[in-house]
Amino acid sequence: MISYGRQSIDQSDIDAVISVLKSDFLTQGKTIDQFEQSLCQYTTAQYCSVVTNATSALHLACLALDINSDSLVWTSPISFVASSNCALYCGAKIDFIDINLDTHNIDISKLEIKLAATKQQNKKLPDLLIVVHMGGLSVDMAQISELSKLYGFKVVEDASHAIGGAYQSRAIGSCEYSEAAIFSFHPVKIITTGEGGAITTNSASVDKKIKLMRSHGITRDISTMEVDDPWYYEQKLLGFNFRMTDIQAALGLAQMSRLEEFVKRRRYLANYYNEMLKGLPLELPDTQLAKDSSWHLYVVKLVEKKVSRRQLFDFLRSSDIGVNVHYIPIYKQPYYQSMGFTQDYCPNAEDYYRRCISLPLHPGLTEENMYFIVNKIREALN
Ligand SMILES: *Cc1c(COP(=O)(O)O)cnc(C)c1O
């Protein structure tokens, strides 16, 4: 099976991991700091914390921004459930803003309309907006930032797809227009640590709280304590064990040096698909619009009813092509249905979901793979 996404591991990655295995620290060692520094350098954000995965990163970001049972969080329905579950972990309420059918990101004009209506009706405005850079294409963060100032909400970027992408010529994760950005290092994402995630921020206090919370809420920083016994530590908050290991960080660090190469290859493959799939009853991604995307996903949308999405999906899967669907609108999940979201709550998201299919896209795909995939799609649609 040609998978829709997979890791690319070379000898430099393997050597990096082996060297940690032979060292004194498998966890809580210096490789963690090095990986964090590398992410700061790349994104230009001032602070970075690496953690067990992007789900815990989102959870910690919400907690560090004081999201609690009085809070309201808004996000996009076309994302992985983690983008929204993080609000629920904190006891907050969640709501969804429909997507734009060109970018598949949150529709900013719909966001603006809903904010204005909410204010007009004297209802509760969101405390936090979690934007998702779908497939690695950045949301228009400057516009989001304007609205956040106008309506007083905070902004977190779920950049799980987006390391290696850029917005206004700056790396995604710079947090120029947000309180924090989150990355995922799951093997299907752009770079991997097996499991892993990171939070970048320019706020010293947010970073401090995240670093406390990822390790039980415990500190050994004597400047914050009154006792100076050498064994002494203090738990300041109710935290978790969300620590990444040095084994993972070593892999992450090695992968960082291959990031540019990965994104370049993904961009090339996306352009190849666009060229080769022209003229078929498919809506292809706008490569000009997505020129700074990290290209985590290559999503096409069917435009004719002659071949259904299910037929195309089954045909490609039976040809060993691991196509996928990203995503089922989050509020359609049974767990979310009890919150009262109606059919067609976000009509664009549901239209998108009916027609979308993600084709394989990862750096390891060969010309031969691509040729095979394209020909099978042609066969299915003709
Ligand atoms: C993959 C993903 C996550 C969760 O990442 P993990 O590292 O697996 O926890 C969250 N949000 C989005 C948009 C994702 O694609």
Image (spheres, helix red, strand yellow):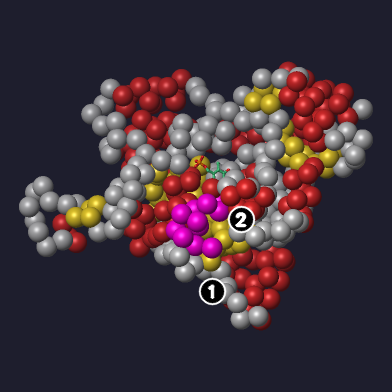
The residue positioned 34% from the left and 58% from the top of the image is 209
Q: In which quarter of the view is residue 315 placed?
A: top right
What residue sits right under mark 1 in the picture? 152
Q: Earlier in the sequence, mark 2 or mark 1?
A: 1
Which sits in the foreground, 208 or 42?
Answer: 208
- As measured in the structure, the alpha-carbon distance from the residue carrying label 2 to the one carrying label 1 is 29 Å
> Which label sits in the foreground, 2 or 1?
2
Quadrant for the N terminus, please: top right
Quadrant for the C terminus, please: top right
Residue type, mark 2 in image:
Ser
Instruction: Mark 2: give few (<14), some (14-19) or many (20+) Cα within 10 Å.
Output: few
Task: Describe residue 209's horizontal placement relative to residue 349 as left or right.
Answer: left
Q: Is residue 110 above or below residue 86?
A: below
Residue range (magenta):
83-93
**Residue 58 falls within the magenta-colored stretch:** no
Instruction: Mark 1: give few (<14), some (14-19) or many (20+) Cα within 10 Å.
Output: some
Q: Is residue 16 above or below residue 271?
A: above
The x and y percentages for residue 43 are 49, 49
The x and y percentages for residue 112 are 68, 70
Residue type, mark 1 in image:
Gly
The x and y percentages for residue 113 are 71, 71
Which sits in the foreground, 318 or 43?
Answer: 318
Q: Residue furthest front?
A: 338
Q: Is residue 327 above or below residue 7?
A: below
The residue positioned 55% from the left and 51% from the top of the image is 83
What residue sits right under mark 2 in the picture? 338
Q: Quadrant of ligand 1?
A: top right
Q: In which quarter of the view is residue 267 placed?
A: top right
Q: Residue furthest left?
A: 229
**Residue 84 falls within the magenta-colored stretch:** yes
Q: Say what secondary structure mark 1 lies in.
A: loop
The residue positioned 65% from the left and 80% from the top of the image is 121
